[in-house]
Amino acid sequence: MNMSITQIMIGNLSVDYAIPLVAEALGMDDDDIKVKSLAETIHRKTEGNPFFMLTFLRSLYDEKLLKYNFGVMKWTWDDDAVKTQRLSQRMWHMYLSTR
């Protein structure tokens, strides 16, 4: 089997592009003030790296800081808890290796 691998370099997202990324991942509107706040926090912690943004979002779910509320049929989170959440050690090592 003969395969070719193509590398695509993408830069970090601005916060204006981070908001729709987080909104899409959560199936929510990007004009929702809570989504904007969450996206801005994630952007600040990851410097807008899309891979780390989505990985951090997943870690919020894994740590039960991001929960789906079936009563209102949307994702919920505590902004203060998210703001104090750190990148996991594994994510931090991956992040440093990209620098």
Image (cartoon, rainbow, N blue to C red):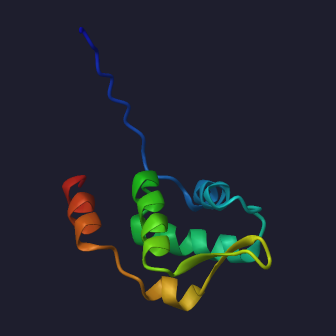
- Give the residue drawn at x 40%, y 59%: 52
**Residue 34 to residue 25: above or below:** below
Closer to the camera in the image, 68 or 46: 68
Q: Quadrant of the N terminus?
A: top left
From the viewer's perspective, tell me whether residue 31 is left or right of residue 44. Answer: right
Determine which quarter of the picture holds residue 31: bottom right
| x and y percentages locating residue 78 in the rendered image | 59, 87
Determine which quarter of the picture holds residue 36: bottom right
From the viewer's perspective, tell me whether residue 53 is left or right of residue 94. Answer: right
| x and y percentages locating residue 83 in the rendered image | 49, 84
- Give the residue drawn at x 80%, y 77%: 72
Q: Is residue 9 visible?
A: yes
The residue lying furthest to the bottom in this view is: 80
Closer to the camera in the image, 82 or 59: 59
Q: Is residue 48 visible?
A: no
Determine which quarter of the picture holds residue 32: bottom right
* Number of numbered callouts drawn: 0
Closer to the camera in the image, 2 or 99: 2
| x and y percentages locating residue 9 in the rendered image | 37, 36
Q: Quadrant of the C terminus?
A: bottom left
From the viewer's perspective, tell me whether residue 5 is left or right of residue 12. Answer: left
- Give the residue drawn at x 73%, y 71%: 74
- Give the residue drawn at x 43%, y 88%: 84
| x and y percentages locating residue 10 in the rendered image | 42, 40
The residue lying furthest to the top in this view is: 2
The residue lying furthest to the front in this view is: 70
**Residue 12 to residue 47: above or below:** above
